[in-house]
Amino acid sequence: MTPEPIPSAIAAIERPREALMQWYFCKALATTVAFPVTLLLLYFRYHTMRYRFDGEGIHMSWGILVRHEVMLNYSRIQDIHLHSNVFKRWLGLARIEIQTAAGSSGSEMTLEGLEDPEGMRNFLYSRMRGAHDKTSSDPLTGVLTEIATELRAIRTAVEQRRA
């Protein structure tokens, strides 16, 4: 069974939107005294941030001096959170936090500056569920499915006898 192809709108995403840099500027402005340093760090984060969505998972990278690269398979996704405050909504932004069963309290990956955050969340949910459904090739799962089918047939037969 081959996985469904990635929608072209999602496969085309490589960089965050320009509105994310506006959000980073406001965020740096809130640090008052540390504004220049914070803005510089966020500027480099924005300009080095890259995304790639393929059939197996999400690839994200950022950084100049310290290069961060995260690859997250769809099958590892446990939960997805969409966060957006008033200013982010005004800029048309949201932050998608993806959590795995790794045991850490924070998110495994945070996607920022995407064009359609709700659409991305829905896409990730469908991939997450599809990846979990594909693990049903386990022999125990097949036996349990057969048992459930037989029980349904018995229940239907009993209900027909009563009627």
Image (cartoon, rainbow, N blue to C red):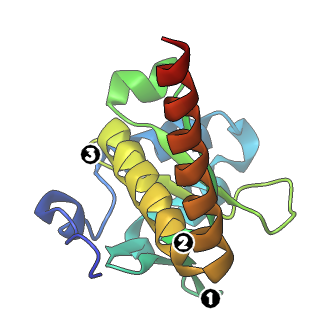
Q: Quadrant of the N terminus?
A: bottom left
Q: Nearer the viewer, residue 128 or 71?
A: 128
Residue holding disc 1: 65
Mark 1 vs 2, N-terminal side:
1
Tell whether 98 sits left or right of 100: left
Residue 98 % position (x, y):
60, 55
Q: Which kind of residue does numbered mark 3 sit on?
A: Glu
Residue 17 horizontal/vertical position (percent): 29, 52
User: How far apart are the two marked residues, 1 and 2, measured between alpha carbons?
Assistant: 43 Å
Horizontal and vertical percent for residue 101?
77, 64
- What residue is rendered at 43% in x and 71% in y? 49
User: In this view, which residue lies farthest toward the left?
Assistant: 8
* Residue 88 percent across, percent down from the top left: 45, 29
Mark 3 lies on residue: 115
Say which quarter of the image contains residue 103.
bottom right
Of labels 3 and 1, the one closer to you = 3
Residue depicted at 50% across the width and 43% down the height? 153
